[in-house]
Amino acid sequence: MLASLWVLTLRHKDLEEVAAHILRIVHLGPEHNSARWLLRTAGRITGKQLGLVVIGILVYAAIRFTEAAGLWLEKEWAEWFALLSGGLYLPWEIFELVRRPTWFKWGVLGINILIVLYMAWLLADSYRRRRAGMDLDV
């Protein structure tokens, strides 16, 4: 939510200068491909595109808040959603790890695998309990 507000504040600013400032903060020089890409992209962003970024951030936040509320209330649909959404990141994380492995990427992948396995275990356990409850009712 805060990210969307921050992006809104950029509407009437020189985005190339904002990108250069961010690059200085993270100590990334213009010799890096990602820095050059960020500067080029920032220079071409329109106000309409910035609005779309804000909408995308808000939709993503709404989805995550809904998932969090469902998990907090122990809803099965939220467990399925968490399993699927966590699993969707795995191919991207593996691709990035194969492309340029770092300990950080290994850690992110490991944590995400643990989360996906935990969600799968929760769903399997929930299914076993429901099944046991149905057997008792018969």
Image: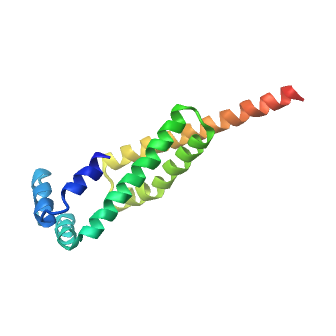
The picture places residue 112, in percent across and down from the top left corner, at: 45, 44
The picture places residue 114, in percent across and down from the top left corner, at: 49, 39
- Location of residue 74 (image quadrant): top right
**Residue drawn where x is 41% and y is 52% of the image:** 60
**Residue drawn where x is 66% and y is 37% of the image:** 124
The picture places residue 125, in percent across and down from the top left corner, at: 66, 33
Q: Would residue 94 be seen by someone viewing this image from the given angle?
A: yes
Q: Is residue 62 above or below residue 15?
A: above
Q: Is residue 19 above or below residue 48?
A: above
The picture places residue 70, in percent across and down from the top left corner, at: 54, 38
**Residue drawn where x is 19% and y is 67% of the image:** 42
Colour mapping: rainbow
- Location of residue 21 (image quadrant): bottom left
Q: Is residue 124 above or below residue 8?
A: above
Q: Quadrant of the C terminus?
A: top right
Residue nearest the observer in this picture, 77 or 5: 5
Residue nearest the observer in this picture, 128 or 21: 21
**Residue drawn where x is 17% and y is 71% of the image:** 43
Q: Would residue 114 be seen by someone viewing this image from the given angle?
A: no
